[in-house]
């Protein structure tokens, strides 16, 4: 049996103490297989954002286990978490967060340049390849400020894939896009999922976006409910 990409068990996240204590995650369990493309659904305050932050190794749970790619991340040091994140996890956000003074290509290769301490010819080739796959062959050297909203989000997807992560977390990646641009971004994500086996977890309130995923994971009151 193939080992899952990630498995969390009994995950709790509590903020504050005493009378100010807020329980956000309450013993949550979740398993994701390698190559899954899943939607994360739930109302505001359900714990979705906190779960995404923990799965992305940007926050530690209060208790419980978080194992990804066979590594127990709840016992890892900050440095080990940073190294793990840089090697294995990509992020796409609702607000693309592109660097305004950079071209599309420079934005895409930025994670690799940070990791390696410099730009390389191999990184530029990888960045160009991704932008071509995103339908942006004619925008590679454009400054990011000259791109449309849909184009910027496709650059953000390419940036998330730059280091060939096994797992990509997308937080409302189409939330600021019109329907046509949203569909285009989702088609590209689906293509990468099928071609490279990249696992995607996409947080969304959009039922049409969720329907394009293979699985819908419903979170409510700090637990997976469906």
Image (cartoon, rainbow, N blue to C red):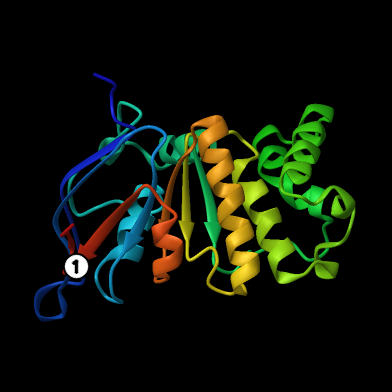
Neighbor class of circle 1 (other Cα within 10 Å; few <14, some 14-19, many 20+) is many
Q: Residue at position x 71%, y 54% from top?
A: 155
Q: Quadrant of residue 99?
A: bottom right
Is 184 positioned to the left or the right of 15 in the image?
A: right
Depicted 96 relative to depicted 89: above or below: below
Residue 131: x %, y % from top left: 76, 45
x, y (%) of residue 156?
A: 65, 55
Q: Is residue 191 visible?
A: yes
Residue under label 1: 220
Is 58 displayed left or right of 102 in the figure?
left
Nearest the eye: 86 or 77: 86
Of the 4 image quadrants, the one containing the C terminus is bottom left
Residue 66 in view of the camera: no
Quarter of the picture holding the N terminus: top left
The answer to whether residue 74 is left or right of residue 199 is left
Who is closer to the viewer here, 182 or 118? 182
Tell me what residue is drawn at x 40 percent, y 59 percent. 211
**Residue at 61% across / 57% down in the picture?**
185
Q: Is residue 37 above or below residue 197?
A: below
Q: Position of residue 35 (x, y in %)?
A: 42, 34
Q: Which of 84 and 77 is in front in this view?
A: 84
Q: What element carries label 1?
A: strand
Residue found at the very far bottom of the displayed protein: 19
Residue displayed at 48% across by 56% down:
170
């Amino acid at each position: 049996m193939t080992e899952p990409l990630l498995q969390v068990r009994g995950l709790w996240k509590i903020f504050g103490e005493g009378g100010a204590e807020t329980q956000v995650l309450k013993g949550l369990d979740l398993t994701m297989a390698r190559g899954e493309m899943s939607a994360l659904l739930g109302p505001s305050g359900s714990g979705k954002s906190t779960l995404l932050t923990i799965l992305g190794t940007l926050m530690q749970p209060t208790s419980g286990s978080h194992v990804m790619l066979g590594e127990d991340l709840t016992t890892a040091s900050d440095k080990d978490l940073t190294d793990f994140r840089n090697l294995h996890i990509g992020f796409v956000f609702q607000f693309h967060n592109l660097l305004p003074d950079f071209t599309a290509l420079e934005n895409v290769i930025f994670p690799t340049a940070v990791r390696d301490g410099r730009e390389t010819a191999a990184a530029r080739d990888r960045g160009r390849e991704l932008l071509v796959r995103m339908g942006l062959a004619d925008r590679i050297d454009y400054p990011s400020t000259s791109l449309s909203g849909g184009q910027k989000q496709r650059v953000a997807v390419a940036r998330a894939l730059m280091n060939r992560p096994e797992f990509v977390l997308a937080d409302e990646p189409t939330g600021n896009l019109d329907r046509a641009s949203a569909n285009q971004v989702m088609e590209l994500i689906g293509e990468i999922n099928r071609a490279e086996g990249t696992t995607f977890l996409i947080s969304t309130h959009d039922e049409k976006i969720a329907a394009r995923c293979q699985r819908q994971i419903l979170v409510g009151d700090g637990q997976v409910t469906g």
